Each structure stands twice: as C-alpha cells, then as structure tokens.
Image: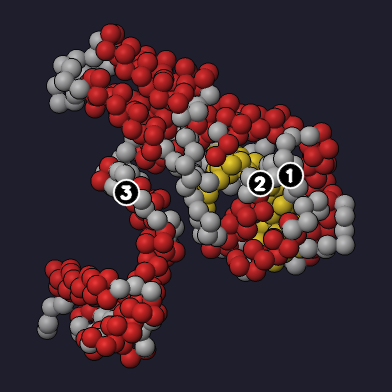
C-alpha cells in the first residue's frame, strides 16, 4: 500500500545526502518535499502540515553527532513522528464483560461482515475466547447467509434468527443467548449503507443503547482514502466508537487513511485487514508500520506470522526426513501450504527489509505456487513419495496433466533438489545432522 509514499520519502531524504550538517535551509527544503509526499499519499492537509511542522522543529533542535549523518537523523525523526501520528503503541481490544459485546459499524462494502468473522477467528485462536456472531444486518439480502458461511469457516456460533426483522430486538436476543450459553464474546454485525444517512445512524445508535457494548469498532476501507477519514469523523460524532479496523491494507491505495485517521478522530487503529483469508487480520502496531513506510521492513510481524503457523510436530517430522534423505514432494507441498497460510506473498515480502527495493517492478502474485502445486498434484502417490523415479515418460505425463512444459517441470525438479540439499546443509550446520 505505501510503495509510492516510501519512494517519495526516500527521495526527500536524499536532499540531505552529502550535507555535513543540518541547517534551516536544507531542512526547509526536505520538509517541503515530505509534505508533498504526504499530500500525494492522500493524507489530510491539516495532518500533513502539523506532521511536517513537528519534524522541522525537532530536526532544527538536534545537534548532529559526528557518527550520524543529517539524512540518517532525518529518517529517525520522521520514523518517530510517523509512529506518533498513527498512535505510538498498539491498543488492545476491551474484552471485559459477560459477555464482552463488540459492535461492528461502517458503510456497506467496507468489510464489516467479513471482518466480524476474522475478529471471531482472532479472538478464538489468539485469546482463547468462545465467540458468538450475531447477524443483525436485516437489509442486505445476502448478509445473514454470508455471516453463516463465514461463521462455519472459523468454527464460531452464529445467531441467525432470519425471521426477526427488527435489528434492535435481534441484537438483544443474541445477547441473551450468548449469556445463557456462556459465550465470552458477542460480535454484532450491523447494517451499512452506500453513504451515511440518518436512518442508519439512528438504528446503530439504538442498538448501542440496547446492548451497551464494551467495544464499538468502526470498519473502514483504506482504499477510499480521505473519504474514509471523513466517514470516520461522522460515525465518531454519533457513536463515539472505541477503535478502527482498517481493511484492504494489502491493496494499492496510497495510505492516507492509515496516516490521517488517528489524528482526525483521536481514536486508535486497533486492527488491519491484510488479505482475504480469515487469518489475515493483524493487530496494528504504529512503529512497525512506520518501519514499513520507510522501507525498513517488519521482521517482528513476519516472525509472529511464521510462529502462528509453525507446527512443532510437523517440523520434527520434516527434520527427521531431511536427515535420512527422505524429503519428498509430499513434504515439499506441505511446506508450501504452511507458507500460504501466512498471508499474501506481496505482504510477506514487504516485511523483509530491502525486499521491496530488490523486487521493484516485479509482479508478486499469490498465484506463484500454482504451477508447482499443479505439477505435484499431477504425480501419482508413488511419484510424490519417490522423486528419483521420474523418468522421461513420467515427466511427459505429469507435464501434460499439469498444463506445463517438460522444461518447466525439469526446472522445478532441479529447484526441488537444490532446496533439499540446502535444507540438509542448514540442518547439519545446526547440529541436526551430527552422528553420535
């Protein structure tokens, strides 16, 4: 999302490259360029001006140490101010209550229903909570069915009551049922409109009064830019919500909403949606996002995602097979599935420092593994378990069945063999391959 902003900021810092010290003239030029970069990223004008004023003030008040160049110091100041602009620290969700009631608000199409299910998945897997979802959007024909399907996907109970047309009564009934059956959290999906109107605002305010939620989360599509900020302000004026879920952070929007929303409504961004999968909901960490905007990556989030999908028993099994030279295509495809669970490839690569520059101009697609999966799935169980058996006739059949060429298949087999050897070497370097 922040690719263009990252490039512009990098160019801004180059103004100070080669300068021996910070002066009012070179800082003024750099700050002016930073402000342009923020405005091009669709950041609120007032927010951009206040931000650059603070950066300028701090930069002029600094004495540059001989070991720190002016450009490096400017990056540090900008990083800290970006983190501050977005809220400084991650803000946890309030789960006090019996049950804790979470009210989802936002316009139609912002992703409320999907992110209600994502939040349920997060609370069940990360917080060990029993979660019930309540389908209280009685106007959009597919909303109740959509939540039912998503609830099944994340293994969460969904209160449907499709015969009830009054969303306020429905929310109250869902709360009663959640209490009766001992659920820890009730997430209420509400109706949205294509634009803010009085009827919608009155209805959600009435639901708020009826169920007294511990958390009201405003769900907003980051792709809508400044409109997202304006909508957030109107919702906050009426509901006084507790936090924001910013969706589609994996898209191609310019990022202005993420940078502006906190300063305009003074409410924290609590979660960000980073993909279509139910696992693609992350706690928002301002400092980590500042890292990514400035091209520093986000290794901490990368490791956290890897750990979330890490299966120790599977890792031990694979390790033993590598040690015995038994690593096969079944093991390889299992590792691919683990990687895919971590999220979109573009998002993952963006977390690795320097990778955005290395892959500049390269199209990174989540379909990258499809040819490999097609080739392995076109093999017989015997062939997947015995990579060395692939002769010419077998390769021709596999290539034809997967819609690939024999040349592509041979290239993949070579990559597989190199990967197997590399994994063996890494294991031996770590002591895993030492004999007693």
Which image quadrant for residue 124? Answer: bottom right
| Lower sequence index among marks 2 and 1 | 2
Query: Label 3 crowding class (10 Å Cα cut-off): few <14, some 14-19, many 20+?
Result: few
Please state, as top left, top right, bottom left or bottom right, where the N terminus lies in the image: top left
Q: Is residue 95 left or right of residue 281?
A: right
Where residue 365 appears, as percent x and y from the top left, is: 40, 56
Say which of marks 2 and 1 sits in front.
2
Q: Is the Cβ of the residue at disc 2 closer than 8 Å to that at disc 1?
A: yes
Mark 2 surroundings within 10 Å by alpha-carbon count, few (fewer than 14), some (14 through 19), many (20 or more): some
Based on the displayed image, in which of its 4 quarters is residue 399 positioned? bottom left
Q: Nearer the viewer, residue 379 or 262?
A: 379
Q: Say left or right for 164 vs 76.
A: right
Q: Give the residue displayed 53% in from the left and 18% down from the top.
A: 46
Q: Tell me whether the residue at label 3 lies in contact with that at label 2, contact meaning CB atoms closer than 8 angstroms.
A: no
Q: Which residue is mark 3?
A: 362
Report, in whole angstroms, how far the alpha carbon at label 3 lies from the one at label 2.
30 Å
The image quadrant that residue 195 belongs to is top right
Q: Secondary structure at mark 1?
A: loop
- Residue at x 28%, y 83% (from the top left corner): 395
Q: Which residue is mark 2?
A: 109
211 in relation to 226, above or below: below
Residue 396 placed where, x, y %?
29, 83
Q: Quadrant of the C terminus?
A: bottom left
Q: Secondary structure at mark 3?
A: loop
Alpha carbon distance from label 3 to label 1: 38 Å
Mark 3 or mark 2: name the one nearer the start of the chain.
2
Write down the residue under mark 1.
192
Q: Earlier in the sequence, mark 3 or mark 1?
A: 1
Above or below for 348 versus 236: below
């Amino acid at each position: 999302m922040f690719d263009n902003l990252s490039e512009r900021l990098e160019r801004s810092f180059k103004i100070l490259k080669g300068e021996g010290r910070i002066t009012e003239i070179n800082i003024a030029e750099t700050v002016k360029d930073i402000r342009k970069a923020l405005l091009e990223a669709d950041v609120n004008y007032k927010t951009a001006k206040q931000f650059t004023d603070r950066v300028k003030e701090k930069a002029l008040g600094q004495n540059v140490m001989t070991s720190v160049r002016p450009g490096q110091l400017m990056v540090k100041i900008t990083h800290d101010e970006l983190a501050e602009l977005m809220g400084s620290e991650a803000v946890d969700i309030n789960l006090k209550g019996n049950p804790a009631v979470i009210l989802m608000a936002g316009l139609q199409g912002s992703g409320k229903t999907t992110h209600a299910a994502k939040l349920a998945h997060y609370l069940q897997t990360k917080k060990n909570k029993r979660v019930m979802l309540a389908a209280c959007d009685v106007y959009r024909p597919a909303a109740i069915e959509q939540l039912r399907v998503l609830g099944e996907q994340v293994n969460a109970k969904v209160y449907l009551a499709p015969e009830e047309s009054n969303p306020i009564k429905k929310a109250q009934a869902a709360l009663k049922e959640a209490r009766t059956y001992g659920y820890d959290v009730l997430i209420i999906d509400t109706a949205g409109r294509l634009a803010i109107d009085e009827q919608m605002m009155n209805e959600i305010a009435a639901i708020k009064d009826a169920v007294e939620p511990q958390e009201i989360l405003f769900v907003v599509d980051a792709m809508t830019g400044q409109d997202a900020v304006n909508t957030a302000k109107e919702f906050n004026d009426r509901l006084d919500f507790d936090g924001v879920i910013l969706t589609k952070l994996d898209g191609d929007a310019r990022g202005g909403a993420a940078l502006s929303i906190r300063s305009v409504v003074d409410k924290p961004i609590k979660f960000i949606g980073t993909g279509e999968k139910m696992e693609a909901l992350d706690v928002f960490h301002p400092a980590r996002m500042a890292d990514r905007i400035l091209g520093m990556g986000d290794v901490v989030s990368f490791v956290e995602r890897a750990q979330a999908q890490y299966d120790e028993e599977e890792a031990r099994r694979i390790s033993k097979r590598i040690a015995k030279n038994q690593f096969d295509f079944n093991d390889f495809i299992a590792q691919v599935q683990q990687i895919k669970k971590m999220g979109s490839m573009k998002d993952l690569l963006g977390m690795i420092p320097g990778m955005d520059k290395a892959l500049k101009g390269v199209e990174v697609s989540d379909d990258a593994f499809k040819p490999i999966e097609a080739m392995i799935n076109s093999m017989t169980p015997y062939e997947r378990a015995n990579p060395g058996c692939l002769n010419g006739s077998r390769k021709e059949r596999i290539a034809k069945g997967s819609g690939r060429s024999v040349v592509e298949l041979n290239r993949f087999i070579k990559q597989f063999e190199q990967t197997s050897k590399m994994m063996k070497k890494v294991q031996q370097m770590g002591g895993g391959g030492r004999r007693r």
